[in-house]
């Protein structure tokens, strides 16, 4: 009987030891998979952050050219697009430069913040800055946070944050104005169908109390036979929607703006941007 008890006791100890070892190995493997030996999530594409304004702000679109009486239709469209372009290239020059630079660096796992971190120096306005882009795995995708520092000015300022789904087909961003203005100024929504190539990006003015709060611009790529790109620009102050459509290769297009033209009819331009009657 004593021998049987000893045998049972020894067996029980062996089972406990094996269970402990298996649990340790399992936990260790999971931790390793999620951190050290894992790979950093893919950064959202550049097009999810910066809208394409190139068809209306290129080298051939000088102020004199746009103001020509024979280019009023295209010129009015271009002048409104220029305003939104200035917001991104001037107001958000620092965070835009920080985002573009991130693609030249690798994310490193940081257990202190439980996130992947892209840390690097970058130049903006001729001044060196430090960026720390953090990517945290969350349900359905990745949460992003961009912290920017500038010597003797500010440190670890959360300039923007966002979310991308697992397949990088849907991305959103939220941008604060600057280190002295902690209110959100612009929100960005981006979507893309990689099978068809269709995509769109929307900037919305979310500055509380601003005259243009709720105003937005949408840029999209479509598969239309005659027009394959568009902007929708909504002025909250005037409760007015401007619609712009054009062909990215042939350059002809049209604009509709009842507030400016006094009619809800389309106003067209040809391949060299001259005003023409709409067909």
Image: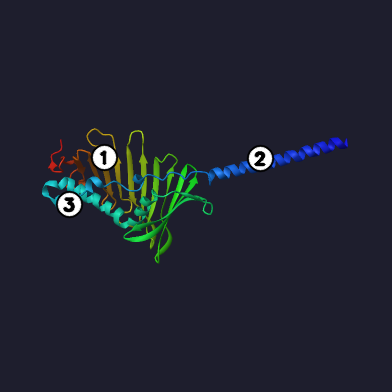
Please give left or right for residue 191 compared with residue 5 in the image: left
- Percent position of residue 88, x then y: 31, 53
SS at mark 1?
A: strand
Q: Quadrant of residue 18?
A: top right
Q: Give the number of the disc on residue 229.
A: 1
Q: Mark 1 near mark 2, Cβ–Cβ under 8 Å?
A: no
Crowding at label 1, few (<14), some or many (≥20) Cα neighbours within 10 Å?
many
Q: Nearer the viewer, mark 3 or mark 1?
A: 3
Q: Residue at x 63, y 42 (%)?
A: 25
Q: Badge 2 is on which residue?
A: 22
Of labels 3 and 1, earlier in sequence is 3
In which quadrant will I find the C terminus?
Answer: top left
Q: Mark 2 near mark 3, Cβ–Cβ under 8 Å?
A: no
- Percent position of residue 142, x then y: 46, 45
Q: Badge 3 is on which residue?
A: 62
Q: Residue at x 32, y 60 (%)?
A: 126
């Amino acid at each position: 009987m004593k021998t049987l008890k000893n045998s049972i006791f020894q067996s029980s100890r062996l089972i406990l030891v094996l269970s402990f070892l298996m649990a340790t190995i399992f936990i260790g493997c999971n931790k390793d998979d999620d951190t050290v030996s894992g790979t950093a999530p893919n950064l959202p594409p550049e097009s999810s952050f910066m809208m394409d304004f190139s068809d209306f702000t290129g080298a051939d679109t000088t102020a004199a050219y746009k103001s020509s009486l024979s280019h009023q239709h295209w010129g009015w469209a271009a002048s409104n697009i220029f305003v939104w372009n200035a917001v991104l290239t001037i107001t958000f020059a620092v965070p835009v430069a920080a985002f573009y630079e991130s693609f030249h660096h690798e994310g490193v796992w940081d257990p202190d913040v439980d996130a992947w971190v892209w840390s690097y120096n970058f130049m903006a306005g001729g001044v060196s800055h430090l960026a720390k882009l953090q990517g945290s795995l969350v349900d359905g995708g990745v949460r992003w946070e961009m912290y920017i520092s500038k010597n003797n000015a500010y440190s670890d300022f959360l300039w923007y944050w966002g979310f991308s789904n697992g397949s990088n087909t849907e991305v959103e961003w939220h941008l604060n104005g600057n280190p002295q203005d902690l209110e959100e100024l612009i929100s960005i929504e981006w979507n893309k169908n990689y099978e068809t190539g269709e995509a769109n990006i929307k900037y919305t003015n979310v500055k509380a109390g601003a005259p243009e709060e709720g105003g937005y611009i949408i840029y999209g790529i479509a598969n239309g036979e005659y027009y394959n790109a568009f902007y929708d620009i909504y002025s909250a102050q005037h409760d007015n929607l401007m619609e712009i459509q054009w062909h990215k290769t042939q350059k002809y297009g049209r604009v509709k703006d009842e507030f400016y033209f006094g009619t809800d009819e389309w106003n067209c331009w040809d391949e060299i941007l001259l005003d023409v009657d709409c067909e």
